[in-house]
Amino acid sequence: MAIRFFSLFLLYRAVFAELLPVSESDGRVPTTDDVHVQLQKLRDDVKILKETYQQVVVDVTAHTQHKDEIGKHEMEIQALKQIVARLEERLEVLQEERRGPDKPSTLTSPTPVIASSCEELRHSDEALKSGMYWIDPDGHGTGDTPVYVWCNMTTGSTSILHDSESSTDVGQCWDAGCYSRFINYNASMRQIIALIELSSVCRQSIQYDCKMAPMEFNGEPQSWWTDRNGVRRNDFTGGNSVQSKCQCALENSCLDRKLQCNCNALSPIETFDKGIITDKSSLPVTRLNFGRILTQPSSGRHSLSRLECYGRQPVQSPKPLPKSCQDLRRTGHTISGFYSVLRSGVIETVFCDMTQMSGEEKAISSFVSPEQLDSLIQRLDKADERIQRQALRIRNSVGRLNVFLVRQNRTNNSQMRKLESIDEKLASDLKELFNSQQRQNYEIAELRRRWDRPQGKSLTRMPANCHDLKAVGHGLSGIYPVKADDHIEMVYCNMTL
């Protein structure tokens, strides 16, 4: 729209502000060659403006991506800190067992157990009210730290919160998917996947409020979402369609029945599209992309619901205390790691490799023996060193990114100020151009009437009446001076008679 506006301005300026003054000065009518020369200059100016605009869009997109990278690095640093803390705790447990292998483990003392889901909490105490609770989907005392979630005690559903629940304006940008937002959940991906595998149903919905901002344009998707595996998905209903598809297509309620989304109708009145995703293998949504939101009045706002899971996967219930890794797997534990099991009347810490349990008959518990303890401690020490080195590299990268973003912000601010000054000058020049165009059009019409008027006769005396005036070429009705007997009179002549 900005390029078309500037093109119109240059066209008027080239044709009316340059060609017409030449005609008035030398009396020459503009030729076709003159028009072609001005149009060629116009095309060059438009090309330069388009390249500049595209560069600004690229810079703004890069700025957004750098912000997302910083957020990802910060999440990685927090995750690494949690891993280091868990490794230190495991190391202390293993060292304690190594110092006293003949003594009963201190883990025999009772400790409070955190539920794996809100459904489990509801069954443990029916008097609980809906609200925020701590749960540990990947297993109590193992895996990642517990997460703080919203529990609906009426339905038993578990909702994981994130930073993109409220309606967010995507701004204006040109290309497909030029707006990108990474979704930060308040739980690790391991905990989220564990909750999904424990639940029978999970869902998440996306809503996009749009005005002249299509989800798909000329057969090319302009918006999409990314699943937990990093795969781009154009189908907002969770299906496998390569084209953009929204909930109204499933319900046969789109504004235009030939289209798959309401936003594709390019309605000047704000409407919305929604998509409900229930494919557990794709959830949760990790990123949202939207594009082709041009200048005003085009607009777009997105919101993403919480990840909601409810129900239980049908599993075989073991005895109250698991005796093997196989019992743990029956209860829904699928992540390899350290677990507490009951052996010979004593609770011991064991390592379960869940990847080796493809079937019930082949499921073998992998217990940690004293001979393996030294090797595990060495591996934990090396892992701790690697994590610290990686954390240092990430901190250095974040520092370099911050320096780059400061420089990039200065450059972007300068470019935006230049664009704003150009827009103000364009608006002022265009207003002046329109006013001068009206005056020039009137002058051209007057010149044409004079050129098209037939040549009058030559008189050797001053006109004495309207007939003499019409004879010498006057064709417009009005008041003219004529010669009477002994003086000059002003008379009105109607030249149409």
Image: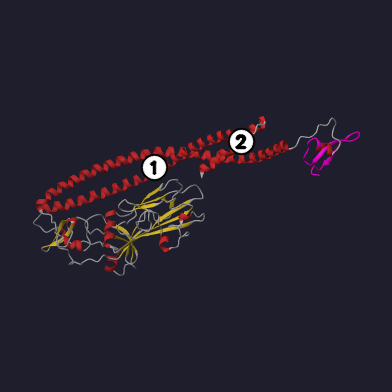
The label nearer to you, 2 versus 1, is 2
Q: How crowded is mark 2: few (under 14 residues within 10 Å), some or many (20 or more)?
A: some
Which is nearer the eye, 136 or 475? Answer: 475
Question: What's the residue type where badge 1 is placed?
Answer: Ala
Q: Position of residue 104 (x, y in %)?
A: 11, 59
Is the C terminus in the top left, top right, bottom left or bottom right quadrant? top right
For label 2, the SS is helix
Q: What residue sits 34% from the left and 61% below the top? A: 278
Residue 430 lies, with reference to residue 326, above or below; the image says above
Residue 331: quarter of image:
bottom left
Name the residue tied to disc 1.
62
CA distance for labels 2 and 1 = 40 Å
Residue 135 can be seen, yes or no = no
Magenta region: 471-497
Instruction: Tell whether 94 sits left or right of 234.
Output: left
Instruction: Mark 1: give few (<14), some (14-19) or many (20+) Cα within 10 Å.
Output: some
Sequence-first tag of 2 and 1:
2
Q: Provide residue 60's location: percent of width, then percent of height.
A: 42, 42
Q: In this view, does 14 lie above or below 238?
A: above
Secondary structure state at the residue bearing disc 1: helix
Does any portion of residue 50 appear in the rendered image?
yes
458 in relation to 83, above or below: above
Residue underneath mark 2: 17
**What residue appears at the point 24 percent right and 50 percent down from the top-left corner?**
83
Residue 59 falls left or right of residue 340: right
Residue type for callout 2: Ala
- Give the residue drawn at x 23%, y 45%: 387
